[in-house]
Each structure stands twice: as C-alpha cells, then as structure tokens.
Image (tube, grey):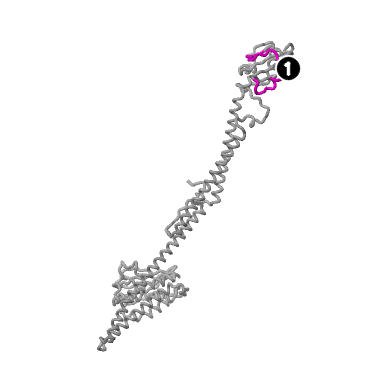
Amino acid sequence: MKRPWKAREKRLLQTSLTLDFLLFNFFLLLLVAIVYIIINLDVVDFRISDQVVDPGLNVEAHVYVTELENEWLSGSSDEANNTEIQRLKDSGGWIEVLDADRRVIRYIGDKQDTFTQYSEAELYAGLENRNEQPYYYSISPLSTEGAAKYVLLKIPRDLVSVRINDNQLITNLKHPLSFYIMIGIGLVLLLIFVYSYWVARRIKKPLSILSLGLTQMIQGNYSTRMSISAEREFVQIGETFNYMADVIENTSAEKRYAEESKQRLIVDLSHDLKTPITSIQGYAQALVEGRGEDKDRQQRYLGYIYNKSVQVARMIQNMLELLKVDSPDFRMHIQQREIGEFVREIMADTYGEIEQNHFGLHVLVPDEEIYARYDPELLSRVIQNLITNALSYNPRGTELRVELIPLDNHVVIEVADTGVGIPQELWATIFDPFVRGDEARTGTGGTGLGLAIARRNTEKMGGRLTLSRRGRETTVFTIQIPK
C-alpha cells in the first residue's frame, strides 16, 4: 500500500516545518472549538438552573389577561382548560385580580403571600423586580366590565432570572469572562510550548548526531559512521560525512601502510645491501692481504667483486626508480599512442637475452593498429621487468608468451611462462618490495623490486597488473591499460 505522504527521509526540511505548522493550526482550531463548547455547556447549565420549572411558562401578565377575558365572556370557570394558567399553577405562581383601589378581589392558584391590598408605592416597588424580592411581578389592565381592573402575576423569584441586557453570553456565564480568557491563553501557550519543543527536538536530534560524529572524527576515530533518520537535508549531510569518513579512513590506512612499507623498505634494503657489500669487502681484503697469489684466483676474486658491485648498483638503481615514480615531482607523458609496434620493439630489444637463456618465445600482436593511453618509458619498464623476472627464476627450455589483446575499453598485455611458477602463498605479497619467488634473501636471485616497480608504473598510468595461472602456463601476468 502506497503511503499518501513521503517518508521523512525523502522530505525537505521546509516541507516538514510547513506540515508541522499546519498541524499546529489544526490543533489550535480544535482547542478553540473545545473552549467554545465548554463555555456553551456552562451557559446552558446556568440558564437551566435559573429558569422556571416549565421552560415554556409565560411570565408576562397580558398573556393571562386574554385567557381570563375569554373565560368571563364564555361564562365558564374551568381553569383546568386554560393551558397557560395551569402551567403557572404547576410552577408555583398565581394570579391576583385587583380592583381600582388595588384590592385583591380574586386570585387563581396557590397564593403564597398575605397581601390583600397594595398601595401605589408597594405595587411600583414590586414591579421593579429587584433581586432581593421574594416574588416576580407582572401587571396588565383588564378591559372587562365590573370591579376588576388589573391582573397581577406573581411567580417565586428563585424560579425567574430577570435580565436587563440582551448579551446572553456575558450575563449568563457562571464565571467571569476573564476566567475563560485566562484558560484559553493558558491552553494556547501550552500548545505553543509543545509545538516548539517538538520542532526543536526534531531538528536537535540529527544535529546532535552530527556533532557527536564530528567530535569523534576530531579525536581520531575515523571508523565513525552516521545513520540519520530525518529530513532529506540531514540525510544528505550524513551521507556526505560517511563518504568523507571513508576517504579519510582509507587515506589514513594508506598513509600508515606507506609508512610501514617505507620502514620495511629501508630494513630490507639494508639487509640486501649488506650481503653483497660484505662479500665485496671479504674478497677485497683477501686481495689486499695477498691471499690471491695466482692469477686465476685473483681473477676469480675480482669477478666476484665485480658481480656483487653490479648487483648493488642494480639494487640502488631499482630503489631510485621505485621512489622516483612516487615522487610528486615525477612527470608522466601519458597520451593515446599506437601500442602494437611498441610491443614488437620491446621484444626485439630483449630477444638476445631471451635466446641466451634458451627460452622459447611466442609474440602475438595483431596486424591492425591498436591505440591505448600510456607512457612509453613506464610501460617499457613494466614489460622488461616481467620478462626479466621470468628469465631470472625459470630454467632453460621455458616457453615465454607475450600477447597483445585489444578489448572494448582497454588493452591487455599478457606476459606468461611455463616455468616453475610462483608459490600460492606469495601471491598476496608478490608485488611488495623485496619479495622473491625463490628462496628468500639468497643473493642469487634478483633485487626483489622488479614486480613492485611494474605494478607501481602500471597503476600510475591508470591501469592494473594482476597475477594468475592458466593451463600449462604456471605464471600469467596481465597488464590492463585504458584506451
């Protein structure tokens, strides 16, 4: 079932605040309606308590005059048929008939006072209907012949409320108007407080999460992540924070790894340099002390010294090359170039060394022109290092394959051999500096930097260098370069 409104995480903050304001207005109108109903209930209750027993009872004397005149004209004295008179009697009131001298010559109903004659002052005072009077008065003249001149209506005062103002809302309230105004103001202030607290809480909660996350980041806890359930702006801020935290965490990890690699590089370099230098010192000392008496031994010692010095020079050169690529001052010349002929030239330059090691060579390059984005110097070094690595660690008769494969978005160069292969446990670290596929640190292998330089150069060009095996080919290096 589809919800008729957007989830909070998909709404804008402005939309949420607008909806909250509309909800506030709805509750405000509901509150006004409730106060109005309470006041009306209070007014009705007051009216009922102040009215006569029969709400339809007439309290004006002229109404009864008409019935009495009709009664006297018809000659009937059946008061039970007179509806208004019967209502009056049931309510505890009565009618007095006065003559010209204001004497009571007749009364209808249960007379509850002792007046038999009224002076003008007494009659006028009664007609004022003051609050302290025991009875309500109403008088009307009679037009029939005879002694009767006036009809005086009397009703117990506690059954009648005399009102001299038409504004029923003011005159009929049990409590002062200020009482209801204060209640209304109090309820409105309570509603405003609740609304303000609700809105502030909705905004404060995601801000508190953001503040806590930033504090943890400042303290170095880069694994901090945020999960915010709020409006779209806060969700976007949280996602941006998480992305920033990912970048910082990865950068810190890479920096830490680089520092560790640098330290390990220095240690390994020191170890690898120590062995050939120690050998050079030993053979040189033997020559100085005259232990190389015959020419053959001297030549052999000098050959050892020369080979070890070449190894040291090559190691230092490779180290400088590895550091040069990572230097911020290093300039690359990457642009789109034809790569087929380039690969053929590299293989032609290395063919003599391959033939000298009695390797079988298979170069597979398509005849059509193939273009890719690369730096000739870096890519040349990558391919040469992979071939040198194959020549250094494999026996004679190994088959070497170099193949160029064009794909849709990139170009693949595979350098594969059928030699002894690289142990599976070294695959995870084979591209790290000073890791060799033969016995560790023997001095008979390479420098251990060739594959590290090859991968670093490939990544600098925006490509990838991976290791795998396929059928008879125990080692397959795959270079991916973007077109």
Quarter of the C terminus within the rendering: bottom left
Would you say 437 lies left or right of 204 here? left
Task: From the top left corner, tell me how far across and down residue 107 is, in percent.
Answer: 66, 13
Residue 273 in view here: yes
Q: Which residue is mark 1?
A: 120
Residue 408, image quadrant? bottom left
Would you say 240 lies left or right of 77 here? left
Residue 74 in view here: no
Q: Does 349 appear above or below 215? A: below
Task: From the top left corner, tell me how far across and down residue 186 is, in percent.
Answer: 57, 39
Residue sitting at x 25%, y 89%: 294
Disc 1, SS: helix
Q: Does 240 appear above or below 469? A: above
Magenta residue span: 107-133
Q: Does 254 appear above or below 310? A: above
Residue sitting at x 46%, y 56%: 213
Task: From the top left corner, tell me how far across and down residue 203 is, in percent.
Answer: 51, 50
Query: Around disc 1, counting alpha carbons within 10 Å, would you say few (fewer than 14), some (14 to 19), or many (20 or more)?
Result: few
Amino acid at pointer 1: Glu
Residue 47, image quadrant? top right
Residue 91, image quadrant? top right
Q: Nearer the viewer, residue 476 or 391?
A: 391
Total labels drawn: 1
